[in-house]
Amino acid sequence: MAEAALYDTFARVPLRFERGEGVWLVTEGGERYLDFGAGIAVNSLGHSHPHLVEALTEQANKVWHTSNLYEVPGQERLSRRLVDNSFADKVFFTNSGAEALECAIKTARRYQYVKGHPEKFHIVTFEGAFHGRTLATIAAGGQAKYLEGFGPKVEGFDQVPFGDLEALKAAVTEKTAAILIEPIQGEGGIRPVPKEFLAALRDICDQNGLLLIFDEVQCGVGRTGKMFAYEWTGVAPDIMALAKGIGGGFPLGACLATAEAASGMTAGVHGTTYGGNPLAMAVGNAVLDVMLAEGFLENVRDVSLVFRQGLASLKDRFPDVIEEIRGEGLLLGIKAKLLAGELVGAMRDEKMLAVPAGDNVVRLLPPLTITAQEAREGLSRIEKAAEKLAAAELKKSA
Ligand SMILES: Cc1ncc(COP(=O)(O)O)c(C=O)c1O
């Protein structure tokens, strides 16, 4: 094996997966792992979903890339379907979540600009947020560990504590263009925002001519048991960023907006080489074929109930390991009593994958195609991991 020549930016777990089937990943050595990480909420339909494989290979045999200089029929279809199933009127396709957020930020700033308010370019964000790793999105996320060493923070992002309405009101000035929030914080530790809070943000935006931007890169596209997390809240944004689950593993993101919010995004002001290319569109449309089919989201909600109940009883049985269960649908988090990394490691020893998050939380984000039986298999592996950790804790304190 050749020595890797990679940037050292990722501390990788020494596991090498060769193939996947549904909720399972199989290593080069043939070991099967139950995948409750789903590539960090990406493999929404699991691994090697036959409909996605077929859509991608069929498109690969036709044309891969033509550029946005020409019409792309797959974009027209996917944008129409996203619009028909959301608050939005218009869509811009990207290759990633951070680019979807960049488009959302630019859309909000341009809106204010064409309305005669170039001074309104500030965006209010929330502590614990994660919006990506570009220069603007690390400024939006506001986390010191991601900003350090990258030069001056991009101007125009004002951060307030999570859930603090008074601080938010105080942060809105004549320079504010928009408010940006994840309806459920993902990297921040699966922290749902109460719907009353989102409704208050909507009011503040309406009263002050601001745009409300939802980042549904992680919580959107079926993850919570509705197509979009905001549908649980009764509060619609003006702009929304999507990625991850919409591509089911193919790099794809999208920025959705109302016609009014997108009114500044005229010909030539924004662009992308790859965004919305035919391969991505074939997969995105195939993801929607499955998710919009009768009963799909209902199954997400049903399995979530089974899984949540099981997790609640594990919490009662292992109070020294599990502090709290959080989340919606299949965007769930275990707030750990010991280090979240230890719990992720113990689960990995049971051949189950999960993803650590902020606030000492372990994220459980299985493919949305998971069955109740597979969810129970997951519970039994978490149980074994918790048993071992609880026994080790007991030994330490003895
Ligand atoms: C809520 C949220 N926004 C944005 C991003 C950035 O997406 P990407 O890594 O595709 O750029 C992420 C990625 O984890 C995310 O969870």
Image (spheres, rainbow, N blue to C red):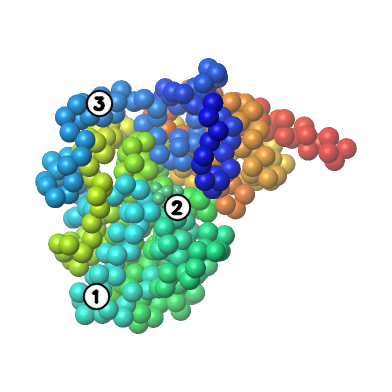
State the residue in front, 29 or 181. 29
| Helix, strand or loop status at disc 2 | strand
- Mark 3 falls on what kind of element? helix
For the residue marked with disc 3, what is the amino acid?
Answer: Thr
**Position of 362 relative to 135 (above/below):** above
What's under tag 1, amino acid-wise? Tyr
Q: Is residue 207 visible?
A: no
Q: Residues within 10 Å of mark 2 (few under 14, many from 20)?
A: many
User: Of discs 2 and 1, which sits in the foreground?
Assistant: 1
Q: Determine which of the numbered discs, if any, sits on residue 302 in the image.
A: none
Q: Which residue is mark 3?
A: 57
- Residue 184: mark: 2
Which residue is identified by label 1? 113
Q: Position of residue 39 (x, y in %)?
A: 45, 37
- Tell me the CA gap for discs 3 and 1: 43 Å
| Quadrant of the frame with the N terminus | top right
Q: Position of residue 219 (x, y in %)?
A: 41, 47
| Percent position of residue 318, x then y | 69, 37
